[in-house]
């Protein structure tokens, strides 16, 4: 297991590399070039410059989160071929820089969705929350609220240039159901996985967050069943998962430790996002500290499922609370994620010493 932290890049993150370096047991970051428009090739020199900056801080950059997928690929329209070609080139370029895993998602239009980016908890911290009844009926309105509450940071997956055309995008998705979306994912994977095998870069799809369809858009990565369909679309170890406990766990019907055991034993989990959430009711949850007793997920059972199945991939804590007066991108402050790292590393050490391999 390698413990890492997500880092958005100089000027786009309130957290600095030297600070990440001081969290015990963190070997690297999940990096990104946030400014490159979705669909374009990531230039080799930009990737190399980022890598050397990270390496100079004493950290590794073996994971990228995310190389986002252009909606034309998800829609399955003719222009997808050029975007797929670009993606293949980005994979090659990342491979040359020693990147081992690319995290991505296949959610139409939106990445994650929340009704509140700063819900106050009893301890005075704030967290991201999702309450279905508070989600505006109009997606544009939700987008504006997310932008307004993001403390001036761009939120990952909510690229303004793409979301400008929201209405048009929704119209285009009218004819795309779950079946079509799955076929479009297969088409994409069939084109990129051979390149991944050559470049030794693993694809790791992130589940839908939350784990159900929103705004009538299809979603296909949110249960044990459709994860199984997905890994079989192209049966290669390079076609794998980012196992996000908070995303899958938002639906209490998903038994997260069991899902981990199954897919980790198959060698298909390359990256794990480990965080806790508190489920308050039907389609109503908020984020919490990583501690098991603060939320609805059993973090010991989750780490044990990874440990018992010989997990060799990367782990990062996921969103943290905003604590100690920190001002940062919602979910991505330093303090609570650092606490999360330390807690997860503590569980891992206990597992290692209880049953050495
Ligand atoms: O919720 C988050 O902040 C992340 O887990 C996602 O944005 C994740 O990076 C993407 O879905 C992966 O493409
Ligand atoms: Fe995640």
Image (cartoon, grey):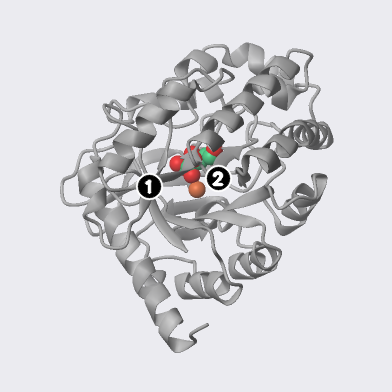
Please give the label number shown on residue 184.
none
Within 8 Å: ligand 1 and the Cβ of disc 2?
no
Q: In which quarter of the image is residue 105?
A: top right
Q: Which residue is drawn at 47% across and 64% down?
A: 1
Q: In this view, does 219 lie above or below 356?
A: above
Whether residue 17 is visible: yes
> Is residue 167 left or right of 14 when viewed as pictured?
right
Whether residue 276 is visible: no
Mark 2 surroundings within 10 Å by alpha-carbon count, few (fewer than 14), some (14 through 19), many (20 or more) = many
Q: Which of marks 2 and 1 is nearer the N terminus?
A: 1
Number of marks present in the image shown: 2
Front position among marks 2 and 1: 1
Q: In this view, does 159 lie above or below 105?
A: above
Q: In which quarter of the image is residue 343?
A: bottom left
Image x and y of residue 313, in percent: 53, 58
Q: Relative to the observer, which residue lies in front, 98 or 130?
A: 98
Q: Mark 2 points at which residue?
A: 101
Q: Mark 1 points at which residue?
A: 60
Outermost residue, bottom side: 354
> Is residue 159 left or right of 189 when viewed as pictured?
left
> Is residue 159 left or right of 214 when viewed as pictured?
left
Q: Which residue is drawn at 31% across and 54% down?
A: 337
Q: Secondary structure beneath disc 2?
A: strand
Q: In which quarter of the image is residue 77?
A: top right
Q: Which residue is drawn at 28% across and 56% down?
A: 338
Outermost residue, left side: 325
Separation (CA) of disc 2 from disc 1: 12 Å
Q: Secondary structure beneath disc 1?
A: strand
Image x and y of residue 35, in percent: 41, 20
Q: Which residue is drawn at 63% across and 51% down?
A: 241
Q: Relative to the observer, which residue lies in front, 184 or 239?
A: 239
Image x and y of residue 242, in percent: 58, 50
């Amino acid at each position: 297991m390698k413990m890492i932290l997500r880092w958005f890049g100089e000027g786009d993150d309130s957290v600095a590399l030297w600070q990440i370096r001081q969290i015990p047991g963190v070997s690297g970051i999940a990096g990104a070039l946030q400014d490159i428009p979705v669909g374009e090739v990531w230039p080799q020199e930009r990737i190399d410059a980022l890598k050397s900056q990270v390496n100079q801080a004493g950290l590794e950059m073996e994971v990228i989160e995310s190389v986002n997928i252009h909606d034309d690929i998800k829609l399955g329209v003719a222009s997808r071929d050029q975007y797929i070609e670009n993606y293949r080139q980005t994979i090659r370029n990342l491979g040359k820089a020693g990147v081992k895993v690319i995290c991505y998602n296949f959610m139409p239009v939106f990445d994650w969705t929340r009704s509140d980016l700063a819900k106050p908890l009893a301890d005075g911290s704030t967290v991201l929350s999702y309450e279905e009844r508070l989600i505006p009926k109009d997606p544009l309105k939700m987008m504006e609220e997310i932008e307004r509450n993001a403390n001036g940071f761009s939120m990952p997956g909510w690229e303004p240039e793409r979301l400008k055309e929201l209405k048009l995008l929704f119209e285009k998705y009218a004819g795309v159901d779950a079946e079509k979306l799955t076929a479009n994912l297969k088409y994409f994977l069939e084109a990129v996985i051979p390149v991944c095998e050559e470049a030794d870069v693993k694809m790791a799809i992130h589940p839908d967050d939350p784990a159900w369809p929103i705004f009538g858009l299809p979603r296909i990565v949110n249960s044990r069943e459709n994860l199984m369909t997905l890994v079989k679309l192209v049966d290669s170890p390079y076609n794998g998962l980012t196992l996000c406990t908070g995303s899958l766990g938002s639906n209490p019907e998903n038994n997260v430790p069991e899902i981990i055991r199954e897919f980790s034993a198959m060698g298909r989990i390359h990256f794990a996002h480990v965080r806790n959430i508190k489920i308050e009711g039907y389609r109503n949850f908020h984020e919490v500290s990583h501690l098991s007793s603060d939320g609805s997920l059993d973090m010991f059972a989750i780490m044990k499922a990874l440990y018992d199945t010989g997990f060799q991939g990367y782990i990062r804590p996921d969103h943290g609370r905003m604590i100690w007066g920190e001002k940062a991108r919602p979910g991505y402050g330093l303090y609570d994620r650092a606490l999360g790292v330390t807690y997860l590393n503590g569980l891992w050490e206990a597992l290692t010493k209880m049953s050495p391999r």
